[in-house]
Amino acid sequence: MGESVPIRCPACRREHVYAPSSYPCTCGTPVTPPLLRGAAPALITHRTWDDDWVTVRCPACGLHAQWPHPELGCGCGAVLRIPVRSVAVDPPGFRGEGPVPPAHIPLPRTASTPRPVFHPVTIRTARDAVTAAALYLKWLGFSDVRRTEQRPASGIGLHAPGLVAQVEPSTRPVSVRDVECLWLNGLGSSAVGVCFSLAGYTDEARRRADSLAVPLFVLDLTGTPQPVNSPADELVTAGA
């Protein structure tokens, strides 16, 4: 990851410390999008593929490539786009950040059994989003995670013993009805319901998920799910 920078959510004013993820260039050098220090993050209310990618130059070989635009999921449910310095306005001789370690999810300090490093899958399509969620659920300890044969009312369904999950890979925030349907599905199956979304959640959906103890995760384009409510934090800590 790159150097950590302070980020304030414009929706709830909560302070975060954010470090951008790194990606391997074709030459093997880890590349980190250069953050634009001092610039305020933007709330993501509508997604376009052009806005979700940023051109970054490799500091070793000079190759330009497109990588996911850095994002952060706030605990209030907002999804923030972190400003980056475009290669088009870099000063002469700028070489970007130096080599850094590959990205990973830091394990909770209170976890009883350390997990191996989670290896995300870059999200470029809806199928990638489902794959990223399935890999993360397996990392949490759920076994035999599979796609459901019957498509849910919205999004794409996953299931495993003791688990029902919904992945919303569109640009539509998850609604309160989606959360309630997922919770009822889990209740009928004696399973925990878990939700993943690319575009975040409505305020009402977030409040309802808290009251029903439904874990909510936001998927950024690196394929690394971020917990956005207390039930999700607890799931990450305890595992399956």
Image (spheres, rainbow, N blue to C red):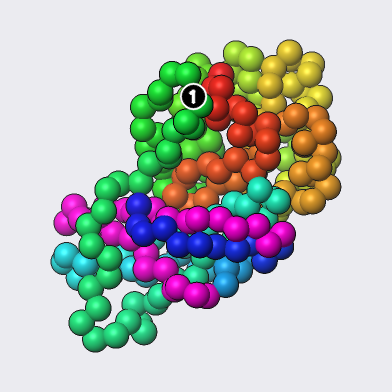
Q: Position of residue 22 (x, y in %)?
A: 34, 54
The answer to whether 132 appears left or right of 185 in the picture is left
Provide the residue designation for mark 1. Answer: 111
Q: In this view, does 9 lie to the left or right of 36?
A: right
Q: Position of residue 126 (x, y in %)?
A: 54, 46
Magenta span includes 18: yes
Image coords of residue 198 (percent x, y): 60, 50
Residue sitting at x 38%, y 41%:
104
Can residue 227 be seen in this snapshot?
yes
Q: Quadrant of the C terminus?
A: top right
Q: Say if 30 sits above or below 41 in the image.
A: above
Residue 169 at least partly seen: no
Which is nearer the eye, 85 or 180? 85
> In this orientation, which residue lies closer to the viewer: 83 or 174?
83
Q: Does the magenta stretch include residue 131?
A: no
The residue shown at (27%, 65%) is 97
Question: Which residue is located at x 22 percent, y 57 percent?
Answer: 99
Please tell me which residue is depicted at 29% across the width and 85% down the height of the picture. Answer: 91
Task: State whether the magenta stretch is mostly helix, strand or loop.
Answer: loop
Q: Judging from the image, what secondary structure is the residue with disc 1 in?
A: loop
Q: Nearer the viewer, residue 235 or 56?
A: 235
Location of residue 158 by image quarter: top right
Image spot of residue 169 (x, y percent): 60, 47
Q: Which amino acid does label 1 sit on?
A: Ala
What segment carries the magenta color?
12-39
Count of marks placed on residues = 1
